[in-house]
Image (tube, rainbow, N blue to C red):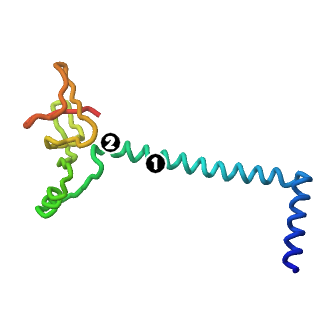
């Protein structure tokens, strides 16, 4: 009985406050806060999706396995058995020396399947090509 009376008084108090207009600014501000939080979380989710997609395109693959050691025969067998498209490349930093001085460079050796995502376009004065030919060296200024 006491609980029913308390609920009745709470409801009548709420209705009186709504009629007087003192709770409207608080209700509106809470609604706006909740809407902003949902909007920002949706924006953050979309930004994350864009960043992940651009990251995959920059890596030229969906997944990249990086190691300082040669890939073992067991890992190569797992890759072949999985049926995944794979490409191998080696990259290392070194110094390049010439008559004009020295330059820090990154050397990257790729196989025929590179890149798995996107396209590789190499341009010269005589035309463009989409693969590095065996025994060919391309210098890219960055």
Q: How many marks?
A: 2
Where on the picture, by quarter, is residue 79? bottom left
Answer whether residue 40 is visible to the viewer in this image. yes
Instruction: Tell which circle, 2 or 1, labels the residue nearer the N-terminal end.
Output: 1
| Residue extending farthest top | 126
Give the side of residue 20 with respect to residue 80, left or right. Answer: right
Q: Is residue 47 left or right of residue 61?
A: right
Q: Nearer the viewer, residue 34 or 88?
A: 34
* Residue at the image position 78 percent from the left and 53 percent from the top: 27
Q: Is residue 130 above or below residue 117?
A: above
Residue 57 disc label: 2
Residue 3 x, y percent position in the rendering: 84, 77
Asked whether residue 70 appears in the rendered view, the answer is no
Which disc number belongs to residue 48? 1
* Residue 103 occupies quadrant: top left
Q: CA distance from mark 2 to mark 1?
A: 14 Å
Percent across and percent down for residue 107 are 19, 42
Looking at the rendering, in which quadrant would you find the N terminus? bottom right
């Amino acid at each position: 009985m006491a609980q029913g009376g308390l609920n009745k008084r709470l409801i009548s108090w709420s209705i009186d406050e709504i009629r007087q207009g003192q709770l409207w600014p608080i209700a509106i501000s809470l609604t706006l806060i909740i809407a902003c939080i949902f909007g920002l979380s949706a924006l953050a989710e979309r930004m994350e999706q864009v960043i992940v997609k651009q990251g995959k395109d920059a890596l030229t693959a969906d997944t990249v396995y990086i190691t300082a050691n040669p890939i073992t025969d067991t890992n190569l067998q797992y890759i072949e058995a999985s049926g995944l498209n794979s490409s191998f490349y080696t990259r290392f930093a070194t110094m390049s020396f010439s008559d004009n001085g020295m330059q820090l460079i990154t050397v990257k050796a790729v196989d025929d399947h590179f890149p798995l995502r996107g396209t590789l376009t190499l341009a010269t004065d005589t035309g463009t090509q989409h693969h590095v030919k065996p025994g060919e060296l391309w210098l890219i200024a960055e």
